[in-house]
Amino acid sequence: MSVNPTDLAIRQMQDRKPAQLSAPQPELIGPAVLLLRRSGLLDSLAQGLAAEHVRLAQALSQSSDVGSVPPTITTGRIAPLLERSASAAANVNSAPSAPAANDRAALPRAGFAGAMTAAAEYASNRGHEALLSRDLQHLRGQGVSLDPTQALDRAILEEYSRSRGPSELRRLVSGMDADEATLIAKQRLEVFAAPASPSGSVPEDGRCAAVVGVSAGLSPLTAKHMIDAQSQGHPADVTLDRSGAAQRRALALAGVERRIGMDRDEYPPATFIEGGAGASIRYIPPGDNRSAGAQIRNQMRNLPDGCAVRLNVVP
Amino acid sequence: MITDIPTRFGLAISHGQISIFDIAHPDFPSWDGEHVAQGFAWRPGHVSFGLPDCETATVELTTGVFASSNMTGRLIKVPLANTSGRIVIASVLAEREAYLHPGLYQLEFGILDECASAPRVCVSFCLSANPVFEIVRQGVEMTVAQPIRFDSFSA
């Protein structure tokens, strides 16, 4: 059986990775994101990251060996952004020094957290640059030219591959254009900047409330449908009601023909009171949509009907 | 023998899948293109089968005997380890729980009519010392003749 070039490249990258690059440091993530937001760099950094991510991913997908990634790949736009954030991040003591519990809760979504950690380290600790340099030196010894921010992108890919699996990484890099990547990168930044509410949390008044996220990494098209529908006025805050789900799904899909090889995705989902007639419908490839359904189901498994749910997109 | 559940029941469907699992392994799996191609996503104790886009399905459960001869749509065999004695047949929208004697089962999943708006799904459990993965017959959206992925992770 032939091995996909990207799988092979990622495997080789994992074999070569320095441990320091892939070890998220939770105490740095919250402050780093706060500082980026305060310094107004959020959007530009996200766009820069996304563009470079796509460029590197495309090169990797066309390469059978990370050693043959074209040296023409540069990250000139993103490096200055990180440098500009360095002065702010150097004053990291002025940011909350202890990570909030919510930051810790976000750590399992390590793809971007790992990158942010690396960014914070790169920006605030020049010692980290030495680590990166060591890594780069190793790669240069094999004829590869990468600068520190490319190593940062590489860390993103590695984290993604490790947490989601090589096949998911392959799907991500093969099905994403620059706009989608930019959107996802922005969302990742915003997710980690916003206080996270663990699924199934119950406020002091005893009323069930939860945040349910659909991963833009696992289900990019379903996530995009959610974002688009919400931007068109469909609610993000919904109420769980399993008992009426079948009827609402039938109402939502009435007159919408089935297409072989596609799923009809509705937003709001039929399992919420707000679903049903008038829902936004979009055709989504089955793998993307099934993964989204699985995520929603897993997060809502222990929630009672009547629970207030906020639907959002997560990394 | 299955108890505490009708052997035939309706199940509201969304997101194109029915999961069958030991209650100790409740998390639905993530899907990728290879899972779609083979018609299922599997890990020990949990299997999720793909369905053509539909709104409801009629599920028929049997034990000790396969219903293969009636099937005209997809027919897939996978192992299922049932350690707890409690199995769940679930969609994203709904679920039914049943008691089934603990053991290692050959699970057979078939669809009577792939193109029906409310397909009839047959699920058979047979105790087996050596259950196999096998695509006996492909269905809509399935593009491989034999299983290629024997892993999935919780979505």
Image: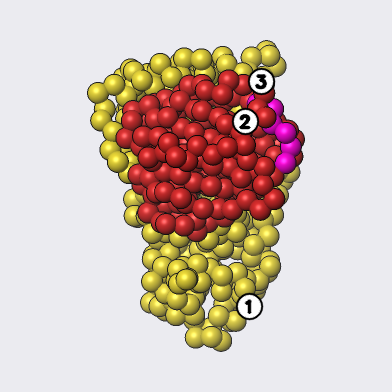
Chain colours: A yellow, B red
Query: How far apart are labels 3 and 1 at the CA level?
Result: 63 Å
Where residue A256 appears, as percent x and y from the top left, is 26, 27
**Magenta region, residue range:** B98-103
**Mark carried by residue A269:** none
Q: Nearer the viewer, mark 3 or mark 2?
A: 3
| Of residues B43 and A221, the one drawn nearer to the viewer in this rendering | B43
Q: Residue at x 49, y 33 (%)?
A: B122
Mark 1 residue type: Arg
| Of residues A195 and A284, the one drawn nearer to the viewer in this rendering | A284
Pointers 2 and 1 in contact (C-beta within 8 Å): no
**Mark carried by residue A134:** 1
| Of residues B36 and A202, the one drawn nearer to the viewer in this rendering | B36
* Residue at image mark 3: B4
Where residue A170 appears, as percent x and y from the top left, is 45, 60
Q: Above or below — where is B58 with respect to A22? A: above
Mark 2 residue type: Val
Q: Regarding mark 1 in the picture, which secondary structure is present there?
A: helix
Where residue A291 appears, as percent x and y from the top left, is 49, 42
Q: Residue at x 63, y 78 (%)?
A: A134
Mark 3 residue type: Asp
Q: Residue at x 69, y 54 (%)?
A: A25
Q: Earlier in the sequence, mark 3 or mark 2?
A: 3
For residue B140, say whether it is visible.
Answer: yes
Q: Above or below — where is B74 with respect to A71? A: above
* Residue at image mark 2: B88
Q: Nearer the viewer, mark 2 or mark 1?
A: 2
